Image (tube, rainbow, N blue to C red):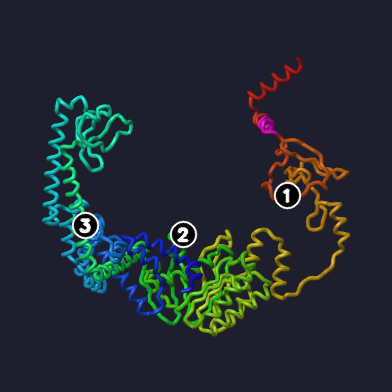
Amino acid sequence: MNINTLEKLGYTQLKEELKNFCISGLGKNLIDNLKPLTNMVGVKKRLNETSEAKNLLNNVNHVPFDGIHDITFLMDKIQKGSILDPGELINISDFLRGSRRLKKFMIEQAFYAPTLSEYALALSSLNFIEDEINNSIKNNKVDSNASKELFKIRKKISNTEENIQQRLSKILLSNKYKKYIQDFHVVKRNDRYTIPVKSSYKNKIDGTVLDVSSKGTTVFIEPSSICKYNEELTSLKYKEKGEEYQILAYLTGMLYEEIQSLSINIELISQYDMIFAKGKYSNYINGVEPNINFHGYINIIEGRHPLLKEECIPLDFHIGNDYRTLVITGPNAGGKTVALKTIGLLTLAAQSGLHISASEGSSLSIFDNIFVDIGDNQSIENSLSTFSSHMKNIAQIVYKANNSSLVLFDEIGTGTEPNEGAGLAIAILEELYHMGAITIATTHYSNIKDYAHNHPEFQNAYMKFNPKTLDPLYEMVIGKAGDSNALWISKRMGLKEKILNKARTYIDTKEYNYNIVDSRKIRKEQKDPICRTDETIYDFRVGDKVLLLDTNEKAIVYKEKDKNYNIEVMVDNKFKSINIKRINILIKRENLYPKGYDINSLFTSYECRKLEKDIKRGSKKVLKKIQRSMKNRDL
């Protein structure tokens, strides 16, 4: 399968997610090397394995993978002639125990998983090796009962050490040596027994200095009376090491004799780990086993992109029956690219034996290759523009594609002059159609949509969006090309209707308006601007909301223009006079206030309006307040 396809469609990320469901590194290693199969028998076998694993997981409490871990590096050591240490042998014993228990379990589950149960027959239990390791290795070291000779040696070591301890204790407790001793306990130095003596008395005790303390105040002396016993102990230790080595070599040799059986066990356990990871993943995504065909038919029912989870809107999609090429239109960020990637990644997943997140009855085809041209392939290193890099990729796709290929194009033909880009895109789609490939392409070009509409084995589709909010709905409608979203969105954004009408005419007829205007007249109008609305001088009225061009402030007209074309406006509760050439209308007063609204109240403070209202209703409190105010003024 094409490497570019696997990267662009997110196949590697999908495998990383699948690895999270593995028990050991054995299954993870297999998933790292997992590739989509291209034959019907292999794909159906993988999908059946996943279905059986899922069925088994849903009907038993626990699959016994206890003790299972990756021992391939230990197998490599054995084959290279290395002797395994006690800890490594215990790891293999655990693996053998796990293999034995899993074999017994799987054979008993033939009802739920007949195929997976049959695989277990090839697992080797190797009970005799497991027992031999467990009897010889305990607490991560060779046990004394591993051999009669080792038992005898360790018995002699114990007796000799006891004899040395007794002799040294007599020296430590002797009144003769009491004042020479630094600490009254036996110390081992360089694997020999010594007594700690004050450095100033080191010549008072007959023996050999084996070590000195870090501060130099203490020397560790091996008395001459126990020298031969230390020598004997050292000799016994060498014999112990030799006997342990023989036992470890014997156990490793047993494993070497069964290296083929162990390798088969590792391979089968790896397969089980990966298969049950697929079953767990299917439960995680509520996956289904898709129907599989080999003739290019795809029918996805409520399919979801495997990596988008809850964020993904279900996709209904079909191709390969009445048509083999689909052209998808729709707004930017409307879900076209996600739809392409969903179709491609679900196909790769199914060919890898994975269930897909979709409804029952979904069908997918097996393809020898899936080719994609998605994203910006611009290459600075190779001095390739976006268009050039797209064309390089597409040229390779057309060269390699055949009647068992799925081809996915995102924005085919973009990056160059639209007419040439559309013409190239149509020619490419036509060539792939004649090759027999299943092709899905997204585009904004109307020429491509028109071609697909007129071709008997091409089909159009579009991604829906909300015309009120302009939000994409991520829903694909097959059988119809999308309308011109550009004009609709432009209208919603406030573009003038006359511009939109001209645009529609140009799109439909390609007849353009080449009327020449007098540029000198335009420049004169720019130097002497007059506030206009649809070519007429606008008379500003009290209450209009305007923009002051010099300060970019918003204001309300307070007094209409005088003979000098000046008007008075209120800005931040302050009044100022300004020429009408220095302002623009923002909102007319009839669009600002309800019918019957008292515009004069805009220029009266809240206190004044309240006072006037109180006077009208005859408030005694307010009247007394006014009378006091008048008296104070007279005084």
Q: Which residues are magenta?
A: 605-612
Q: Amino acid at mark 3?
A: Tyr
Mark 1 and mark 2: Cα distance apart in space: 42 Å
Q: Main secondary structure of the magenta part?
A: helix
Residue closest to the eye, 491 or 170: 170
Is residue 606 on the magenta stretch?
A: yes
Mark 3 and mark 1: Cα distance apart in space: 97 Å
Provide residue 472's location: percent of width, then percent of height.
54, 62
The residue at the far top in this view is 635
| Residue marked by disc 3 | 245
**At x 32% / y 63%, what residue is drawn?**
26
Residue closest to the eye, 342 or 382: 382
Q: Secondary structure at mark 1?
A: strand
**At x 64% / y 60%, what residue is drawn?**
492
Q: Residues within 10 Å of mark 3 (few under 14, many from 20)?
A: some
Q: Secondary structure at mark 2?
A: helix
Q: Amino acid at mark 2?
A: Glu
- Say whether residue 562 is visible: yes
| Residue marked by disc 2 | 311
Provide residue 577's location: percent of width, then percent of height.
81, 39
* Left or right, 172 with reference to 385: left
Q: Nearer the viewer, mark 3 or mark 1?
A: 3
**At x 17% / y 57%, what residue is drawn?**
134
| Residue marked by disc 1 | 586
Q: Amino acid at mark 1?
A: Leu
Q: Secondary structure at mark 3?
A: helix
